[in-house]
Image: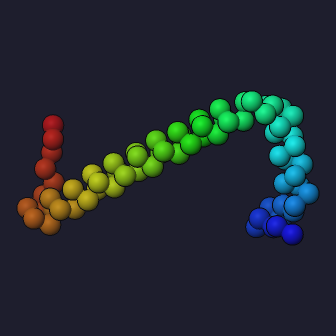
Amino acid sequence: MLYIYPLFIGTWEIIAIVALVLLLFGGKKIPELMKGLGQGVKSFKKGMNEVEGEITDIKKDIETTGEVKKDN
């Protein structure tokens, strides 16, 4: 059996959830939902990479000059 800790979701529960999603949204709507979910994840990762890049730039500025350069 497949268990997802701490929910303890078994195989039959997963099958029931998939069947419920198919009943609610239909077979044609699910690919659209997955595409939107994928775009959301891609956008989130892009934002995280931008923030990490800015943090890295700030760290380099502090190491080289001892102060943070302000863009404004």
The residue under the point 76% across, 67% down is 5
| Left or right side of 46 for 56 | left
Tell me if residue 8 comes above or below residue 38 in the rendering.
below
Quadrant that contains the N terminus: bottom right
Q: Position of residue 41 (x, y in %)?
A: 53, 45
The residue under the point 16% across, 54% down is 68
Q: Quadrant of residue 33?
A: top right
The residue under the point 82% across, 67% down is 2
The residue under the point 59% across, 35% down is 36
In the rendered image, the residue lying farthest to the left is 65
Tell me if residue 46 comes above or below residue 24 in the rendering.
below
Q: Nearer the viewer, residue 21 or 27?
A: 27
Q: Nearer the viewer, residue 16 or 66?
A: 16
Tell me if residue 14 comes above or below residue 38 in the rendering.
below
Q: Position of residue 21 (x, y in %)?
A: 81, 39
| Left or right side of 36 for 68 | left
Q: Position of residue 22 (x, y in %)?
A: 83, 37
Whether residue 50 is visible here, answered yes or no, is yes
Quadrant that contains the C terminus: top left
Whether residue 6 is visible here, answered yes or no, is no
Coloring scheme used: rainbow
In the rendered image, the residue lying farthest to the front is 28
Q: Quadrant of residue 70?
A: top left
| Left or right side of 70 for 51 | right
The count of marks equals: 0
